């Protein structure tokens, strides 16, 4: 009854083509954004920001990035962890080499460096496809982690190979280091998430997104209708790596504060982000958020229930967590192979017809 | 009527007599799952059991019950952050994360929150300089001491001269494993031995190529900085290539029963450093049996009592309890805060009389902590595995390390950290 197109008249092309054509969706979106920007910063505390919200926001960016490459352009990548490491180490080198540089610029430049590296590793995608490409990106993962471990220049010759984020501020507020207030680090990441998600949504709706999807659906047909595979695939690799690099830089500088490449950016990170987009839904911005939320929040929630309320031993709870999350993934993929995004789409379809299903 | 009044009066009196005190909270960021669980479990058991013992036998620390909050990290830094944030609000007095990676992360956070961190024999070695790292402690010994002990042992073993010989370092390719490299390089310059570095990637199950290289190069000594499953695999591989076990020396984190048992007789003679005594031949274990195990309150499966890493967890808990007692004395209150705990740790004195009173005579070295030295004396001993008796035993006393080289490195590294983070050196 409430959720319908009827009565919501569009009087211009711009209005007809807006992201949220249904008034109910539009208002929901505005309210969510207003809540995230205006209410949450006043409520948030150390625990929520560091244990739940920051990882969710940062992994959302990574998931959007991988979704552009895999979900929209159809190029499977297992190099996400390696590309996140590139972002993190670029951020570290920039932060220590140019202490007066604003963190916003540092993060954007780290994304830029990662985009360049991503394009380099994307070159083989012109010749190889599918599983073979996945293996090539897997090589990127192992090569990059090895490189950051091998050459001490990347970690400024520190004895341990650890990189630690020194304190840096934006507009006078510390955003990295020890003296960060929860609201500041939250808002800093939220701004990046907002701008990047908005850009991704519009990129995928525009000419570039359509080219990516054409390549994904059938690359020979796309080439025949005039889509240049070289440019299209490499832009997908570049944009995707830009997002993933930013996620890596934020993960290191804002969330962890110190990182070690073999531990923080290993292959399991690549799989984590890949699971996020598979569960959330390939080729959907909303799906990236839903998948990140599922993979980040579920373990914390299960831990709090099993250890906090039921008082189980921590090792039992931790093993059960694997069982439950793993089981949910399997069940989910059987019942709804297209992820949360498809569930959401179906729910909306049903709601539009409700209460007259026929 | 009269009875209820009497009861009420009694209740009121008892409340007045013992003011309600909050528990002293000691979070245990442990790991009982994942590739490092074999080593994480005994340590966590020992840590928890000692607090159970103190509560049952002594009625807590200075009359206040100690409470251990366990949080599973799986040796994973992201879970470590979650654990730190979820326990710090409970009034955590000191963190012992048992992970160099998590320690690195907690150094700035805990310092800003005013909570001390005790990374006993791990973590950032230069935290020994308390003038820069006000809230971080790593007494009684650190990795660089360990590197020096291992070299000293090799020198003694080869008759006082090691020049021209080769030492291979098999290390976990992480902050933990890389820590000793700089010290070993300095020592190799000083003593003239050749150092060959062999990195093993997390989690360390795949070491064929490293040991193939050892077989080819035949180094005179092999040192190991390993943890978790990596230890077992390395010792097994060394046994497979018939590397002489008495030339194979592990750091104190690579020398527990769980590491050598899988290799069976092949592990006989393997050596590891020790920062405290081994075995269960101490009066404190009678108390643990009486108050903890027999009472059914043992942590975990209760089958680790007396193993090397159980002892280490117990030792860590003992040092925390003694620091809390010291803090209670300094501040004259039983209900201490993390800031008071820090003062207690900085004024901690462990002498023979104290250890004997606790039922742990000659369990570890005697030492005292000061603002200038958060690292203790750095004494270490060598222990050796007897596969037929299935027992570790110390084959040397607690000896000093080459502090001249180590102190210079600590000063250099802590000065770099101070410059990076704008910390003015000084004592609080």
Image (cartoon, rainbow, N blue to C red):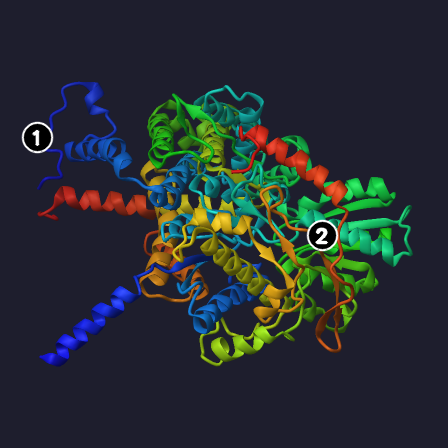
Chain bearing tag 2 is B
Circle 2/circle 1 CB separation < 8 Å: no
Nearest to the eye among marks 2 and 1: give it: 2
Q: Position of residue B194 (x, y in %)?
A: 85, 44
Chain bearing tag 1 is A
**For this view, does B54 lie left or right of residue B284?**
left
Q: Position of residue B136 (x, y in %)?
A: 54, 45
Going 46% across and 64% down the picture, which residue do you hit?
Answer: A315
For this rendering, which residue is in front, A295 or B359? B359
For this rendering, which residue is in front, B280 or A9? B280
Label 2 sits on residue: B146
Label 1 sits on residue: A7
Q: CA distance from mark 2 to mark 1?
A: 77 Å
**For this view, does B165 lie left or right of residue A47?**
right
**For this view, does B57 lie left or right of residue B418?**
left
Instruction: Find residue B25 and name its label.
Output: none
Q: Secondary structure at mark 1?
A: loop
Going 91% across and 56% down the picture, which residue do you hit?
Answer: B159
Image position of A246 with respect to B18: above or below = above
Going 55% across and 20% down the picture, which residue do you hit?
Answer: A98
Q: Secondary structure at mark 2?
A: helix
Q: Is residue B79 visible?
A: no
Q: Position of residue B171 (x, y in %)?
A: 70, 50
């Amino acid at each position: 009854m409430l959720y319908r197109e009827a009565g919501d008249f569009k009087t211009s092309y711009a209005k007809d083509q807006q992201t949220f054509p249904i008034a109910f969706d539009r208002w929901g979106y505005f309210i969510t954004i207003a809540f995230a920007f205006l209410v949450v910063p006043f409520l948030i505390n150390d625990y929520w920001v560091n244990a739940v919200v920051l990882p969710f926001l940062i992994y959302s960016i990574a998931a959007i990035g991988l979704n552009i490459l895999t979900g929209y352009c159809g190029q499977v990548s297992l190099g996400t962890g390696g590309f996140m490491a590139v972002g993190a180490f670029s951020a570290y080198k920039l932060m220590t080499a140019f202490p007066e540089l604003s963190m916003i610029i540092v993060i954007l430049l780290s994304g830029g460096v990662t985009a360049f590296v991503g394009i380099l590793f994307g070159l083989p995608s012109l010749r190889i496809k599918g599983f073979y490409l996945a293996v090539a990106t897997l090589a990127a993962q192992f090569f990059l982690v090895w490189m950051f471990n091998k050459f001490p220049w990347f970690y400024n010759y520190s004895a341990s190979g650890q990189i630690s984020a020194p304190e840096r501020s934006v507009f006078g507020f510390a955003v990295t280091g020890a003296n960060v207030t929860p609201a500041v680090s939250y808002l800093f990441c939220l701004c990046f998430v907002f701008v990047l998600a908005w850009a991704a949504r519009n990129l995928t709706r525009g000419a570039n997104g359509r080219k990516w999807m054409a390549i994904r659906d059938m690359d020979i047909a796309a080439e025949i209708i005039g889509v240049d595979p070289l440019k299209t695939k490499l832009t997908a690799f570049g944009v995707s790596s830009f997002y993933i690099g930013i996620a890596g830089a934020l993960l290191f500088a804002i969330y962890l504060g110190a990182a070690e490449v073999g531990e923080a950016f290993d292959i399991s990170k690549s799989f984590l982000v890949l699971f996020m987009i598979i569960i959330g839904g390939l080729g959907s911005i909303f799906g990236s958020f839903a998948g990140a939320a599922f993979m980040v929040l579920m373990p914390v929630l299960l831990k709090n229930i099993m250890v906090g309320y039921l008082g189980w031993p921590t090792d039992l709870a931790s093993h059960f967590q694997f069982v439950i999350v793993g089981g949910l993934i399997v069940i989910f993929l059987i019942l709804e192979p297209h992820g949360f995004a498809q569930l959401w789409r179906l729910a909306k379809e049903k709601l539009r017809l409700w209460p007259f299903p026929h | 009527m009269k009875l209820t009044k009497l009861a009420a009066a009694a209740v009121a009196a008892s409340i007045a007599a013992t003011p309600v005190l909050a528990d002293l909270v000691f979070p245990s960021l442990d790991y009982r799952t994942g590739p490092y669980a074999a080593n994480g479990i005994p340590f966590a058991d020992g840590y928890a059991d000692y607090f159970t013992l103190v509560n049952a036998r002594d009625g807590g620390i200075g009359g206040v019950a100690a409470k251990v909050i366990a949080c599973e990290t799986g040796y994973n830094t992201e879970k470590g952050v979650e654990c730190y944030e979820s326990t710090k609000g409970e009034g955590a007095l000191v963190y012992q994360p048992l992970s160099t990676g998590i320690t690195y992360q907690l150094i700035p956070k805990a310092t800003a929150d005013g909570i001390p961190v005790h990374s006993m024999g791990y973590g950032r070695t230069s935290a020994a300089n308390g003038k820069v790292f006000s809230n971080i402690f790593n007494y009684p010994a650190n990795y660089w001491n360990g590197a020096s002990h291992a070299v000293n042992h090799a020198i003694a073993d080869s008759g006082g001269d090691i020049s021209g010989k080769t030492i291979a370092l098999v290390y976990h390719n992480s902050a933990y494993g890389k820590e000793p490299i700089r010290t070993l390089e300095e020592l190799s310059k000083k003593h003239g031995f050749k150092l060959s570095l062999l990195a093993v990637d997390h989690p360390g199950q795949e070491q064929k190529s490293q040991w193939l290289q050892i077989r080819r190069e035949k180094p005179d000594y092999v040192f190991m900085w390993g943890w978790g499953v990596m230890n077992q695999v390395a010792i097994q591989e060394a046994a497979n290539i018939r590397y002489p076990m008495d030339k194979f020396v592990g750091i104190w984190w690579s020398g527990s029963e769980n590491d050598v048992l899988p290799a069976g007789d092949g592990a006989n003679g393997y050596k590891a450093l020790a920062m405290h005594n081994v075995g269960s031949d101490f009066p404190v274990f009678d108390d643990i049996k009486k108050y903890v195990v027999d009472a059914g309150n043992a942590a975990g499966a209760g089958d680790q009592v007396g193993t090397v890493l159980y002892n280490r967890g117990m030792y860590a808990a003992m040092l925390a309890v003694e620091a809390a007692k010291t803090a209670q004395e300094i501040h004259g209150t039983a209900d201490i805060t993390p800031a008071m705990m820090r003062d207690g740790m900085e004024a901690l004195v462990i002498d023979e009389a104290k250890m004997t009173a606790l039922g742990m005579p000659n369990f570890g070295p005697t030492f005292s902590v000061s603002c200038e030295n958060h690292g203790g004396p750095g004494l270490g001993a060598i222990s050796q595995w007897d596969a037929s008796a299935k027992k570790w035993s110390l084959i040397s006393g607690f000896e000093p390390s080459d502090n001249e080289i180590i102190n210079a490195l600590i000063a250099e590294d802590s000065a770099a950290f101070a410059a990076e983070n704008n910390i003015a050196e000084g004592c609080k």
